[in-house]
Amino acid sequence: MKKLYFLLFALTACFTFGQNIAVNGGFETWSTGVLGTWSSESGTTITQETTTVAEGSFAANFEVTTASQGDTDFRQSISVVAGVVYNVSVQIYQLDNGSRARLYAGDYRNYSDESLLNQWQTVSYEYTADATGDVEFGLRFYDISANFTGSSVMIVDDFRVEAQTTPSIAVLSPADNSTVVSGDVDIELSIQNFIVANGTGDGHIHYTVDGGGIVMKYDTDPISLTGLADGEHTVDLELVNNSHASFDPAITTSVTFTVSSVTQVADLAALRADVATNGTGGFYEIMSTPTITYTRTNRNQKYAQDTSGTGILIDDSAGTITTTFAIGDGISGLVGQTSEFNGVLQFVPSADASVAVGATVTPEVVTIATLLTNWEDYESKLIQINQATFFDAGSSFAASADYDLMDTSSRGGVSIINFRTNFAEADYIGETIPSGANDIVVFVGEFGGSPQVTARSLTDLTLSRVNFNANNEFNIYPNPVTNGTVNISSSSNEAIKVAVYDILGKQVLNNTLTNNTLNVSSLNSGVYILRLSQNNNTVSKKLIIK
């Protein structure tokens, strides 16, 4: 009785937490104006704040200078213990409503309220570690498109990660609101600061399945549920004392998951057909052996396509596939769930897969005109576009940037598609954009309802090259044009054939120059494409008319 009284007192008196394990979470440590122990990206400028602080002597002043939230992460790696519940919190002081902060605790969590200006607000999240190891904690900053003017400022202070030291019960697996592919499910538990035993410990566990009768459990082994029907199921759990009574406050948790049967499909084409009919969210087993065409460390992504001529993006942020795959390997035993991100169908694996013999993948030759009308047929597939030209040839590729790519596949004009540098690890980032017309190999993707393409490597962008020699480079001036005339010259004396296209690909002028002067006074203000030919060489340039 004495022991029970003490435990009840400890539980009802207050909730206690451990020491803040975030290093420099109060932002007190700076070295020559640089904040210590945290990593940050180029989309924010961090300075020491000495006037507006939530605790201590200093805070961190964040100026958000980009609308690309992927360039604003602010993080620190912290060691956690499986099953332990951590209270994560940060103080935010919004100086304007042009951006907001989002808490990161193993994933992106809760946002600050951009409407609460000139006052401290707390953004918090209760994080349960599902494994022992290092987990990243921090912030990401998002522009508010209606209010963002290219710069937004907020002050951040008192970032805390604290382990709870009160008794707790948590479900490690399956994840809440997840889908499992079998009616036999093990509920894995984590009990902290509480001894589960029959009469000799602090108490035991009561649980129910789908609101049924109470089951008493005197150990912390997984709860094995068998024969669950397809559909949603909820398991409620509570720590109780040795007399089966609840504590005050009650120590409870629950998990809700959905059981879904696996559909076997012959190949990736059949997978896409079934998703087109039934939507995303189903679980599938792919009976073919797709060939890996690219692998990434980012989200453990893999691109694959099989002999049906269909491609898929495997998005494995959880690292479920632990087997190592290389380009050209076949992937066997692919099981998982379909989802969609920005219009792109993704396959999220639910089990590991094995390496098999891959098939030879020859990129299909496709024109931009075809992609513009039918890109979803080629989504995540490796294709080849012949005689493609970058408008920005000569400048350098930047990560997460857009570039106009064209070919002459439309009748009487040109076709233009967006080339997006989605692969920050690609060897062409920072390199010179190839000039002239090239046969290139790309993946087809989508963003916001529009197609885009991206390449794996610089080799994919320079399969064949048709370039001018140095003595045949063109000089185009003025550009932008303001007086209705543009001068086009090269070191060669040969005539220059000039075709001018509007941004929709319609040809609006076609001349052969002998005096290096092109009259464009009949054209409206806007952006145009110059297709220049001389000595059997052709190149495209961008022309702006004001």
Image: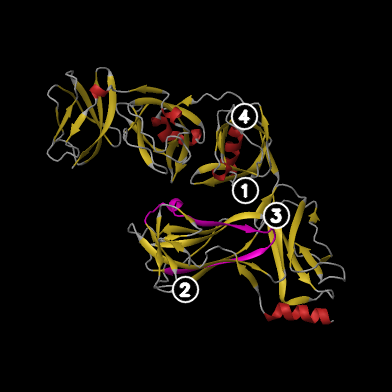
Q: Secondary structure at mark 1?
A: loop
Residue 442 vertical placement versus 88 (above, below): above
Residue 194 vertical placement versus 286 (above, below): below
Circle number at residue 54: 2
Among the two numbered marks 2 and 4 on one chain, the one whose residue lies closer to the N terminus: 2
Viewport quadrant of the N terminus: bottom right
Which of the two marks, 3 or 1, is nearer to us in this view? 1
Residue 367 vertical placement versus 227 (above, below): above
Q: Please report the residue visible at 72 percent of the width from the left and 77 percent of the height from the top.
A: 11
Instruction: Find disc 1 in the rendering and name its residue.
Output: 318
Which of the two marks, 2 or 3, is nearer to us in this view? 2
User: How far separated are the C-alphas under marks 4 and 1?
Assistant: 21 Å
Query: Callout 3, which amino acid?
Result: Pro
Instruction: Find disc 3 in the rendering and name its residue.
Output: 174
> Which of the 4 image quarters holds residue 301?
top right
Q: Is residue 515 visible?
A: yes
Instruction: Find disc 4 in the rendering and name its residue.
Output: 329
**Depth order, front residue of 333/434:** 434
Image x and y of residue 442, in percent: 46, 32
Is 79 inside the magenta-drawn segment?
yes
